[in-house]
Amino acid sequence: MLNIGQIVIFSAAGLLLTSLPALATYCQPHKERVDKSLAENPPLSEAQLKEVKRLREAGEKSDKAGHQQDCIDALTDAEKILKLR
């Protein structure tokens, strides 16, 4: 028989596991927006372009490592430079 503490822990773990796929797919739209904007040769300084590319790469690495929030943060920063946000 499970006690209330075990039920709470198992419920929380279940919620976490079911939400991970949703976070994983959330990075993709950000990556696509950044990539599309870069393909259109945005009017950025060389330093801004370099930073956007660095952030895009950081987002990709974070996504592959399973660090979804880091991915989203990096790509959102890139979108801000590109004035997509």
Image (spheres, helix red, strand yellow):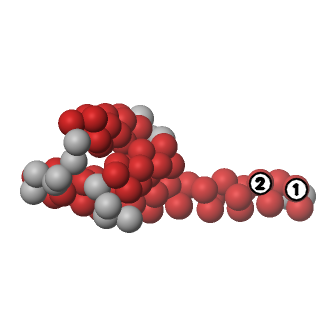
Residue at 46% across, 57% down: 23
Q: Is residue 16 left or right of residue 27?
A: right
Is residue 30 something one can see in this rendering?
no
Residue at 28% across, 35% down: 47
Q: Position of residue 32 (x, y in %)?
A: 23, 57
Q: Is residue 74 left or right of residue 69?
A: left
- Specify the amino acid type for callout 2: Ile
Label 1: element kind? helix
Task: Tell me, yes or no, whether the two marked residues, 2 and 1, touch with CB atoms within 8 Å.
Answer: yes
Residue at 42% across, 45% down: 74
Q: Is 26 or 74 nearer to us in this picture?
A: 74
* Quarter that holds the C terminus: bottom left
Q: Quadrant of residue 8?
A: bottom right
* Quarter that holds the N terminus: bottom right
Q: Position of residue 63 (x, y in %)?
A: 38, 43
What residue is disc 1 on? 5
Q: Quadrant of residue 29?
A: bottom left
Q: Name the disc covering residue 9, or none.
A: 2
Q: Position of residue 25 (x, y in %)?
A: 36, 59
